[in-house]
Image: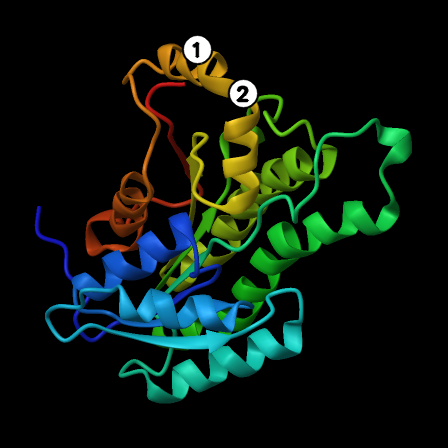
Amino acid sequence: MEIGFEGRTVVVTGAVRGIGQGIAHAFAALGATVHAWDILADGLQETRRTASPERGGTIHPHVVDVTDFDAVKAAVEAAEAESASGAVDVAVHVAGGVKGQSKRPIEEVTLEDWRAIQAVNLDGAFHLAKAVAPGMKQAGTGRIVVISSGAAFNVSLTGIHSYGTAKSAQVGFVRQLSAELGPFGITVNSVAPGFMPTSPDYVRQWESYGEEGQTAMVKRIPMGRIGTPKDIANAVLFFASDHAEWVTGQTLRVSGGM
């Protein structure tokens, strides 16, 4: 199955670390013009520096806060202005995570803590979809992919109420939006990764288990290993490709069988 994205314009949010960086690199290696977004400017330069673009692919770093709709809209319009189709062809929302928080009893969770996680995970997905949809509708095609989590289907290993809730809500959002945008030739899907220590918050979580806990976790995974950003990128590439033009409203769990 040949997959290529030559001439396609792709936006990837949360492109500095782990899964987001892996997805940005994967699209660039298959010829896409990738607009890599994050709030960490130095990290964006590293994402571009460590990429191996092929077939005309490029990575363009942009500092964008996905919780700010005006900033998202402006960045989308800039990408559309340079796109051959006049639209963002593929939009992938990866930005999210637990925002440095840890497990606490609900009575100790502040409203600000709750909203911070909802804002980047759920509002960010909404902002990106809202901004790219008009251009995709005009083009008559488009791909939107949201990175959710296994926490959408089980109790979150993080123990953080807002995180598990946001990831579940992302799946519902994808399902609802797919029904609306399908008639315009736009697909909307989600990938739900299993746990992988690919950012500082999740590295801390992984290290908190200790050697014995880490070994026990790996043993519970039927495939016998922790996942990698490449595993998730491969699923996203499929959803974004022409091979998935009749697949929408779906969430693919990429978790080694967990």
Locate residue 6, reporting x and y percent: 16, 71
Give the residue drawn at x 43%, y 10%: 216
Amino acid at circle 1: Ala
Q: Secondary structure at mark 1?
A: helix
* Residue at the image position 44 percent from the left and 18 percent from the top: 214
Q: Quadrant of residue 144?
A: bottom left
Tag 2 secondary structure: loop
Q: Quadrant of the C terminus?
A: top left
Q: Residues within 10 Å of mark 2 (few under 14, many from 20)?
A: few
In the current view of this chain or complex, which residue is farthest to the right?
A: 107
Task: Reply above or below: 58 against 27.
Answer: below
Depicted 55 relative to depicted 78: above or below: above
Label 1 belongs to which residue?
216
Few, some or many residues within 10 Å of mark 1 (<14, 14–19, 20+): few
Question: Which residue is drawn at the image coordinates 25% and 47% (left, top)?
Answer: 238
| Vertical placement of residue 219 versus 199, above or below | above
Closer to the camera in the image, 130 or 75: 75
Circle 2: residue type: Tyr
Answer whether residue 245 is visible to the viewer in this image: no
Q: Find disc 2 in the rendering and name its residue.
A: 209
**Residue 126 coordinates in the image, percent (x, y):** 60, 59
Alpha carbon separation for disc pair 2 and 1:
9 Å
The number of discs equals 2
Q: Quick check: marks 2 and 1 in contact, CB under 8 Å?
A: yes
Rendered image: mark on residue 12 = none
The residue lying toward the viewer, choosing from 208 and 90, is 208
Residue 174 visible to the viewer? yes
For this rendering, which residue is in front, 44 or 114?
Answer: 44
